[in-house]
């Protein structure tokens, strides 16, 4: 064993359709999506829970503010744990071509929920990013 961590996650590129205004034709783009296994989701969630509780334990020694920080971090750890354990996929980002100005723009990181809303960096057009019908689950 080399000591290199093995992660149970798969990253794949997914084609997307970028839509602008009503009169402009759609353009193509792609996003990178990471999918975590149950084991990896549990590992990530436990790390966050442990980090919140460790900081909360440290905050016990701080006068006065420990009355807020300790219970707040205890609850935050549970909330983060439940969110991370249920998060199977995440959009890591991507690239697309604006249908309005035909400039390349970055698609930001976010939840794997389509359609996504994005703003073109060049012309400030509101864009809708969606998966093609052939890629939908």
Image: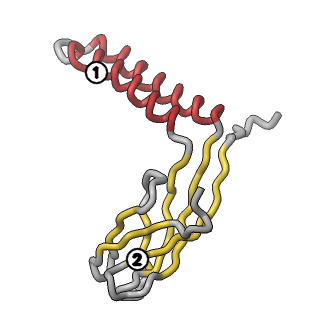
Q: Nearer the viewer, residue 132 or 94?
A: 132
Residue pictured at 64% horizontal, 59% vertical? 12
Q: Which percent across, then down, holds residue 47?
A: 52, 28
C-alpha gap between disc 2 and disc 1:
42 Å
User: Is residue 120 positioned above or below 91 on the image?
Assistant: below
The crowding category of the residue bearing disc 2, from other C-alpha atoms within 10 Å (few below 14, some 14 to 19, many at least 20), is many
User: Is residue 103 positioned above or below 1 on the image?
Assistant: below
Residue pictured at 33% horizontal, 76% vertical? 121
Residue at mark 2: 19
User: Is residue 76 positioned above or below 29 on the image?
Assistant: above
**The N terminus lies in which quarter of the figure?**
top right
Q: Nearer the viewer, residue 56 or 105?
A: 105
Q: Which mark is residue 54?
A: none
Residue 88, by quadrant, is: top right
Label 1 element class: helix
Q: Which percent across, then down, holds residue 67?
A: 21, 13
Label 2 element class: strand
Q: Which percent across, then down, holds residue 68?
A: 21, 18
| Disc number lying in front (2 or 1) | 2
Q: Which percent across, then down, holds residue 124?
A: 27, 77
Looking at the image, which residue sits at the far right? 1
- Mark sitting earlier along the chain (2/1): 2
Residue pictured at 59% horizontal, 65% vertical? 14
Residue at mark 1: 72
């Amino acid at each position: 064993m080399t000591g290199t961590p093995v992660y149970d996650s798969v990253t794949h590129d997914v084609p997307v359709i970028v839509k602008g205004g009503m009169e402009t034709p759609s353009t193509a783009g792609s996003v990178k999506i990471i999918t975590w296994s149950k084991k990896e989701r549990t590992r990530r969630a436990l790390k966050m829970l442990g980090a919140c509780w460790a900081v909360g334990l440290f905050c016990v020694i701080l006068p006065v503010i420990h009355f807020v920080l300790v219970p707040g971090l205890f609850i935050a750890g549970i909330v983060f744990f439940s969110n991370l354990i249920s998060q199977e996929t995440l959009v890591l980002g991507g690239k697309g071509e604006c249908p309005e100005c035909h400039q390349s723009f970055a698609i930001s990181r976010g939840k794997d929920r389509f359609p996504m809303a994005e703003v073109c960096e060049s012309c400030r057009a509101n864009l809708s990013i969606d998966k093609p019908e052939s890629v939908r689950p």
